[in-house]
Amino acid sequence: MAVKQQVKLMVLLALSSCRDEAGHADAETGAAADSSTGTPGTSTTSGDPTAADSGSTGSDTGGEIAVVPAPGGLRRLRADQYIGTVDVLLGGHAAAAASPPPDQSLLGFDSIGGSTVPMSPAMVEQYERSALDIGDAVIEEPYTLAQLVPCVDVGPKDEGCYVQVAQVFGRAAWRRPITVDEDRALVDVARVAREFGGDRFELGLKYQIAMILESPAFLYAAELGEVGDDGRRRLTTDEWVTRTALFVLGRAPSAQTFVRLDAGEFDGPEAPRALAQEWLNQSAARTAVGGFFDELLRVRDVVDSSKDPTIYPLYSHELSTSMRTESLMLVDDVVFGDGGGDIRRLFDADYTFADPLLAQVYGVTVEGDGFSRIELPAAQDRLGILSHPSLLSVGAHYDRNSPTRRGLFIQRQLLCNDVPPPPPNVDTNLPEPVEQTTLRERLEGHLAQGGACVGCHAQTDPLGFAFEFYDATGVRRELDNGYPIDASGEVDGLGSFVGAAELAVLVRDDPRLAACMVRNLYRHAIGRQEDEGTAELLASLSDRFTAAEFDFPGLIVDLVDNPGFLEITDPQ
Amino acid sequence: MRLLRKPSISRRTLLRGVTAGTSVAIGLPLLEAMLDANGEALAGGEPLPKRFVTWLVSNGFLLDRFEPEQTGADWDLTEQLDPLADVKDYVNLCTGYANHGADAGFVSGHIEGMTVFTGYPYSNAGGFYDAGGPSIDQLVADAIGNTTPVRSLQVAVSKANTFANSGTLGSAISFSGDPGSLVPLPPLSSPKAVWQSLFGIFPGPGAPDGDRVVRTMMLDAVKAQSEDLRGKVGAADRARIDAHLQGVAELNQKISALAPACVLPDEPSLENLEPVGSEQIRLVSESMSELITYALRCDITRVASVMFLGLAGETPYTEIGIASTKHSLSHEAQYNGLALNNLNASIIYEMERFAHFVKSLRDAEDALGANLLDSTIVYASSDCSVGWLHSVSRQPIILVGTGGGYLKYPGIHVQAVPNDPSDPNGLASPYMPTAGNTSDIALACLKAFDPGADGFGGGAAESVDPLPDILA
């Protein structure tokens, strides 16, 4: 650990302090939210001589990889995972009643918050309320549960039915066999509630369902593993199947999956790969992949912001919702469409999807009320998701553009170059602005004075200047403040470019893109931060991803089928 | 005797508008028959209830428009404090004190600024920031939170919180537990959800018989399962399970509580779902103020915290026609006169919202005919002193209310050290003149609720010397 901290310190020291054009980088990017060990694959080489010795050997990923897996422990289901699990186990009516507390994102990912942050009393209470509401919904529409436990609908509605719910539904919801004591407690609650409810079977069922959903066995995915003869701690079958489902499907496994599991269907060494591949064909996988990019690219943030209506009359909550949909549709098309899953198409797609609201942003017309595939207008110099209105809006303020924010996004989210936040104890005296100028000139004029800010802003602002032809809502503009726009730039490590489309190609071709995406997918998938023990694993995955033409579904399968995913070290 | 003073506005209808669509009568939580002969304690010997509320308004002030010139008992409100004019006698104002949370060096200003609520420097938890220790409201709740159905309440007004991804220090201002195993308590931003949490817990007319019994059985099962799980996990997760168990205990406390002797307010429909920039700050703030006032008055809880605006002040107050965030304005104010005016207007707008809250406490009578400011201490500060250099020097702390005659009335302005008149807002240097320790102020307040408290905070910001100047 000492080595790791040293590396961190050196990285931080090497990057000089800075701040953005109006002092926003600190806040909007989260102050040093990502102070991990720098660029994956380059700076994470293990300095710990014991790491390689104690590491396990990769199985199907080819070659010998030294892996010290992340620690096991408890991962609280993310809100989307909670709702998705309720949906698959109890049906859409129940899912509509689910109201889990919001997630806490850490290091860029809700999954990490879920494995780290303790629950507040208000959250415990919210889970109870959600569980009771779901219980009400289930007794209104018991049909999904009835597919699993028919007696809840057709009877006999007796205590034997409560026993069945506890054993069959309880097993699936808790993702492990239930104990005799637990079984008894679940039936007792149902019986007592039924008595209080004037001998109404459904009331007993409501509280029984609620009790199952309020349980820590439902709320947390417990990843504790079992130590084998070789000393390695492997996730149990219940655990790895659950971990895989939470990652690939964005929810816990269905009851049917546990029936297959209990029949021994997932016992062989080939099972993880096969299961991941099978699940990638389900619609839930498409939603889950969308969720990853929604979070990684901060697309979801667009619906949480608003814009000055006097400057941006087109902007509305409806439009921002359409912006988010557009980006997620492109993700879905790239990953699951005809393009073969090559994630680079996300950055160089010359088409997008627009509804009538977005068509106004693009200055085109579309037929019908829904989304249509459109070619990007040639004169607008757009390419791929980086010039989507969603990202351009998130990378801007309420009332103006933020080249720093837009540039920082590329550095941090796509290249994993963790530009530090601005420290406060620097001279922030900006020169009196000359009224007749562009935002770029104003920023550059300030930074031309030198000082502590230049180092960081040289990494961010020029990338943002590439998007100066788009306003804070993504609408193309030809002038800034009445003056011509210069969208050219050059950034160390990326190269020089003129405009958004050229920059998109540079990002697409940057070797850091694959490594960064692998790192982020790992964080999202298992809810842990990478470290020395997983560095070789991530590098190996990154190499395979690159060699496989950036096949994103293939990356998902590779990530599942390796010891860094299927094994753990002692629970944290 | 202050407790028995008549309120300045008597029998005023407490809750109007947002919360109560219809006029509601509120029963009194403490019957006068329950008081002892002197009216100074309950007949059973328990002390009269005291309440505590923290309030964060982020991104600081303009000290040359905030700090009064005079100190001591005879002081005048300034431009930015003027909204408190109606309750000035209840204000004890502390300026010029040193926040030692930044002694080890700045990260952002905003992170360090939160030390005024915890007394600890922040903790760097591996790439994100956590509080270094429990917040003062939670220490107060440790002392008095078990006497009410709800141990403590956390609410937010604006949802702007760009620090939320930077660690739990950005997503909450209340932290319970001990350093190393703190539990962040993120606020609820929906008045409807706050109502649910405060008042929805009590069984309504439609609730089935036995609801409490069955829910208690369920929680017992959760408890048993959690304890079983606790034995299988590592130290970090054990702490998380302990937090879960604490939540279960508090929920049990609520479920087992008798419905209060108040007529409960109507459930508000307001959910505060608008995106930042379009938020109904005024309406939400007033609704939250009223809900907290109600809860304190009905003795449903005695401890609350309000995150009026998340760290770094990232919302524009569009309701008063300001299009730039307070954060942007504070950086631009140094060279742009319009931005300076808008920053000043933003701060005053925030102070007006704060004043609305403390005035709603002032206007609420308890059983003795005294108003809630007589039994409450409201502890308000920001995440920095002045936003433009993120300075945490001279972070002011505004105390409103006497806490049962514990703080001075009429209040005073106590100043640790005069400011530098040539650079009152730290424009040339963020290190403005400071002295003392903001934690001394917090410790003085803490002792109103926990007389045995012999310290507050830890590390460079620790205090063992409660500030005497503000004590009655």
Image (cartoon, coloured by chain):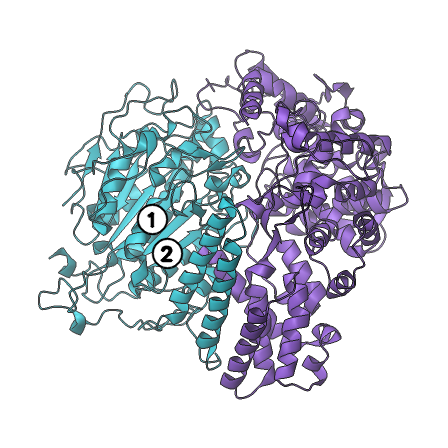
Chain colours: A purple, B cyan
Q: Kindly identify the amino acid type of the residue bearing the numbered disc 1.
A: Asp
What chain is tagged by disc 2? B
Give the distance between the C-alpha atoms of the residues marked 1 and 2, in whole angstroms: 8 Å
Please tell me which residue lies in front, A8 or B239: B239
Location of residue A555 by image quarter? top right
- How far across and how far down the image is residue A77, in percent? 61, 54
Q: Residue at x 81, y 56 (%)?
A: A282
Query: Relative to B376, does residue A63 appear above or below in the rendering?
Result: above
Residue extending farthest left = B37
Which secondary structure lies at badge 1? helix
- How far across and how far down the image is residue B286, in percent? 40, 55
How many numbered discs sit on the rendered protein? 2
Which disc is residue B137 wearing? Answer: 1
Q: Which residue in the structure is indicated by mark 2?
A: B152
Please tell me which residue lies in front, B135 or B370: B135
Q: Tell if the residue under mark 1 belongs to the same chain as the one under mark 2.
A: yes
